[in-house]
Image: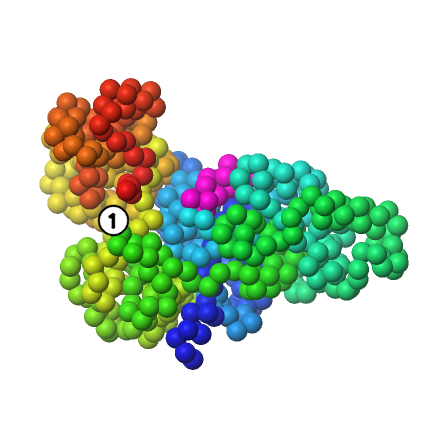
């Protein structure tokens, strides 16, 4: 197959949702259609339900599951589809943000009873920032949810994206009869069904006089009225607007009953983007370029404690990835090659000989990689758009066993390279501040330091609200500010100076008093 065709057949996307909306269930049904799994229940949820007090075995178990389901590849209608899994748990939001840098589109799952939830809003912010095309699946129509019109309004208001229904539900809950497809003018009948893959379909126009006999007089009437309203209120679906991340087509269904999933998948295959160009610090890289380039968006510790190597997830952005070929590691300025890169076909790992744009390649790593690292065939460029966001919780890491400080240093370094948390170092006394978006990470780090590195630590909470990266065109002013602020200045993993602010108010005041200093809320800025 030609290189161009290899690119054209690939679709790389993520399913995102607030926990419990049905992401795992939908993933599983998509894999069933793709023939990647044969039975329901084969996809394990990598949800962490417990909070900080959880027993640690649970965390270990979850980590195991999340390696296995990090990327799921399947074939459907001549396409090669890569689903990148994202943890739903809020404490792992950063992991999800980074995964979103490696996809070309997303499917967003909404629970029709709960509507738009907090985590959905935050995830959509990241999609909007990157103009990622979004398809929305409103799930659990077998339950009595909010009115579909209200749901659409809520989507537009809270997610700040225009929506366009492509199917329309006929009732909900116990009276749910199915959906009418506005694009192929067909009725899809709902039945409670966990094994059957396709719904019964009748192709029928809304004006057709047989409609009442299929749906009943009242429901047929309501459907006609509602569809008329929709066609009047919403612009026709535009693929360009979808590609630009401005318009989201909306589907209604019930993942657990396999209802609406095939229509979703078929439409996804038709409209979702092929592997796209990606920005770097030098120039955009097109997937069609013949030289390999790509970046690491996720690093996972190996669960086998006897093998300290890690798994780095590499997204191919251009060219062809080949086993045993030397590639240029831009940050370290050295050439490395990989003896056993692997793919994630049907969740069992197999050696990969060639990878194409859109693919995710698993690389065994002995400590060469950090998140965001770029591989090329020699060109000096780094993929951008993989920023760190300011953490929300900050604690000082205190070594409890001075005999083990080497182990502790190494452990903290590796765990923060993996992106479990962010590390900031205070100049004074080399104190280490760890920042995360959730309490759970502190437990994870403490546990892993002890079990994987043999080091013990404790946490001292810090009164810090936010970390701001600081820059200035005037180097002297920046140095002066850094000197003046003393212990409120720390350095991130790339040695960039960061201002640790106690409150929003502190940031505002410092901004006003130091107009020549710029305060940034992410680590990437122009
Ligand atoms: P995730 O946290 O987003 O991955 O959600 P899951 O896929 O684990 O689903 C959460 C719960 O909702 C599970 O108990 C599912 O069985 C249930 N669920 C998923 N889809 C449907 C649906 O269409 N209807 C109903 N009633 N329940 C569903």
Image point 60% across, 64% down: which residue? 266
162 left or right, relative to 343: right
Q: 10 Å neighbourhood of mark 1: few (<14), some, or many (≥20)?
A: many
Image point 49% across, 52% down: which residue? 244
Mark 1 and ligand 1: say if the CB distance to the nearest ligand atom is below 8 Å: no
Q: Position of residue 506 (x, y in %)?
A: 29, 21
Q: Front-most of 233 and 149?
A: 233
Relative to 272, say whether 138 is above or below.
above
Could you tell me which quadrant the C terminus lies in? top left
Q: Position of residue 8 (x, y in %)?
A: 46, 69
Regarding residue 337, the answer to whether it shows in the image is yes
Quadrant location of residue 178? bottom right
Q: Front-most of 26 and 104?
A: 104
Q: How many marks do you count on the picture?
A: 1
Relative to 173, say whether 238 is above or below.
below
Could you tell me which quadrant the N terminus lies in? bottom left
Image point 22% across, 27% down: which residue? 516
330 left or right, relative to 270: left
Residue 122 is covered by the magenta coloring = yes
189 left or right, relative to 407: right
Q: Position of residue 403 (x, y in %)?
A: 11, 41
Q: Secondary structure at mark 1?
A: helix
Q: Position of residue 440 (x, y in %)?
A: 37, 38
**Region in magenta:** 116-129
Image point 79% across, 49% down: which residue? 223
Quadrant location of residue 287? bottom left
To which residue does mark 1 refer? 417
Relative to 484, say whether 198 is above or below.
below
Q: Residue furthest bottom?
A: 1
């Amino acid at each position: 197959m030609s290189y161009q065709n290899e690119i054209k057949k690939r679709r790389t996307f993520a399913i995102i949702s607030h926990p419990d909306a049905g992401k795992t269930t939908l993933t599983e049904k998509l894999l069933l259609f793709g023939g990647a799994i044969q039975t329901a229940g084969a996809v394990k949820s990598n949800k962490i339900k417990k909070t900080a007090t959880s027993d640690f075995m649970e965390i270990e178990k979850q980590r195991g599951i999340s390696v296995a389901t990090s990327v799921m590849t399947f074939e459907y209608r001549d396409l090669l589809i890569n689903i990148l899994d994202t943890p739903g748990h809020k404490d792992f939001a950063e992991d999800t943000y980074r995964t979103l840098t490696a996809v070309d589109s997303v499917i967003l799952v909404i629970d029709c009873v709960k509507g738009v939830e907090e985590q959905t809003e935050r995830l959509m912010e990241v999609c909007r920032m990157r103009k990622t095309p979004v398809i929305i699946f409103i799930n659990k129509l077998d339950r009595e949810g909010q009115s579909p019109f209200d749901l659409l309004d809520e989507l537009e208001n809270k997610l700040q994206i225009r929506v366009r229904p492509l199917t329309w539900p006929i009732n909900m809950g116990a009276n749910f009869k199915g959906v009418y497809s506005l694009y192929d003018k067909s009725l899809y009948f709902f039945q409670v069904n966990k094994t059957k893959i396709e719904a019964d379909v009748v192709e029928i126009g809304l004006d057709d006089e047989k409609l009442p006999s299929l749906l009943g007089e009242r429901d047929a009437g309501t459907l006609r009225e509602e569809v008329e309203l929709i066609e009047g209120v919403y612009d026709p679906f535009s693929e360009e607007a979808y590609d630009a991340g401005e318009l989201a087509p909306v589907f209604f269904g019930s993942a657990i009953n396999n209802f609406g999933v095939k229509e979703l998948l078929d439409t996804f295959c038709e409209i979702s983007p092929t592997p796209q160009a990606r920005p770097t610090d030098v120039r955009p890289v097109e997937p069609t370029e013949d030289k390999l380039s790509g970046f690491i968006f996720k690093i996972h510790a190996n669960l086998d404690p006897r093998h300290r190597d890690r798994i780095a997830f590499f997204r191919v952005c251009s060219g062809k990835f080949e086993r045993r070929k030397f590639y240029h590691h831009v940050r370290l300025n050295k050439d490395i090659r990989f003896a056993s890169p692997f793919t994630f076909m049907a969740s069992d790992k197999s050696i990969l000989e060639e990878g194409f744009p859109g693919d995710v390649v698993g690389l065994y790593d002995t400590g060469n990689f950090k998140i965001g690292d770029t591989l090329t065939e020699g060109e000096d460029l780094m993929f951008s758009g993989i920023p760190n966001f300011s953490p929300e919780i900050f604690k000082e890491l205190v070594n409890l066993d001075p005999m083990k400080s080497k182990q502790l240093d190494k452990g903290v370094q590796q765990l923060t390279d993996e992106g479990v948390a962010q590390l900031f170092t205070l100049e004074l006394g080399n104190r280490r501040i760890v920042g995360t978006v959730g309490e759970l990470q502190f437990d994870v780090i403490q546990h892993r330091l002890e079990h994987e590195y043999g080091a013990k630590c404790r946490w001292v909470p810090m009164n810090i609200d936010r970390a701001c990266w600081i820059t200035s065109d005037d180097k002297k002013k920046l140095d002066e500010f850094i000197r003046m602020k003393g212990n409120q200045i720390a350095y991130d993993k790339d040695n960039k100076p960061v201002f640790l602010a106690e409150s929003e108010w502190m940031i505002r005041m410092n901004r006003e008093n130091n107009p020549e200093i710029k305060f940034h809320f992410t680590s990437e800025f122009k």
